[in-house]
Image (spheres, grey):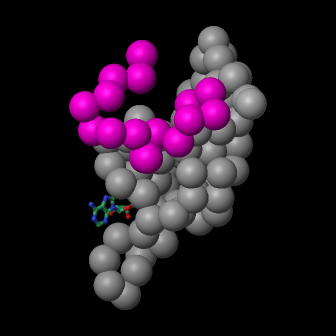
């Protein structure tokens, strides 16, 4: 089990026909690591952070916090 954030084949699209903003995103961030997200305006930074934090739904893929899929957690659960 990976200790940290594990982003696996993350996809997020909006609308119909789908506008694909995040396409097959894969990375890991170890627990305790500080990282920054950079990119031009409109590149999908906020969409990525909403997906990683569970503030918004994702289209497909997984976001694991220390092995646990955050989008499969019950809504009342606070994982911190
Ligand atoms: N709720 C939404 N519905 C439709 N399109 C969206 C929505 N949220 C973001 N987008 C689109 O996704 C793209 C990335 O937006 P965003 O994640 O806010 O970029 P950034 O934060 O890097 O400036 C933009 O083209 C934006 O218009
Ligand atoms: Mg933004």
Quarter of the image where the C terminus is located: top left
- As drawn, the residue found furthest toward the left would be 76
Q: Is 70 within the magenta?
A: yes
Q: Is residue 80 left or right of residue 63?
A: left
Q: Is residue 5 visible?
A: no
- In the depicted view, which residue is nearer to us: 38 or 49? 49
Query: Is residue 60 positioned above or below 32 on the image?
Result: below
Q: Nearer the viewer, residue 74 or 8?
A: 74
Across and down, in percent, residue 35 comes to 61, 24
> Residue reaching furthest right?
1
Q: Is residue 54 magenta?
A: no
From the viewer's perspective, is 7 left or right of 55?
right
Residue 38 sits in quarter: top right
Furthest-top residue in view? 32
In the displayed structure, 7 sits above or below 59; it is above
Residue that protrudes farthest toward the bottom in the picture:
17
Residue shown at 32% from the left, 84% from the top: 16
Q: How many numbered circles are shown?
A: 0
Q: Position of residue 39 (x, y in %)?
A: 54, 45
Q: Would residue 53 be visible to someone looking at this image?
A: yes
Residues drawn in magenta: 65-80
Q: Residue at x 33, y 23 (%)?
A: 78
Residue at horizontal 63 percent and vertical 34 percent from the top: 67
What x and y, as percent, mark residue 66? Answer: 62, 27
Q: Quadrant of the N terminus?
A: top right
Predominant secondary structure, magenta span: loop
Q: What percent of the width, then of the height, locates residue 70?
A: 46, 39
Between 64 and 12, the residue placed more toward the observer is: 64
Give the quadrant of residue 17: bottom left
Q: Decide if residue 16 is on the left or right side of residue 70.
A: left
């Amino acid at each position: 089990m990976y200790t940290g954030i594990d982003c696996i084949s993350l996809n997020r699209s909006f609308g119909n026909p789908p506008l694909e903003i995040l396409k097959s995103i894969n990375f890991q961030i170890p627990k305790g690591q500080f990282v920054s997200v950079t990119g031009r305006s409109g590149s999908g930074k906020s969409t990525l952070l909403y997906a990683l934090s569970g503030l918004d739904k994702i289209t497909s893929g997984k976001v694991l916090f220390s092995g646990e899929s955050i989008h499969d957690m019950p809504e009342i659960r606070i994982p911190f």
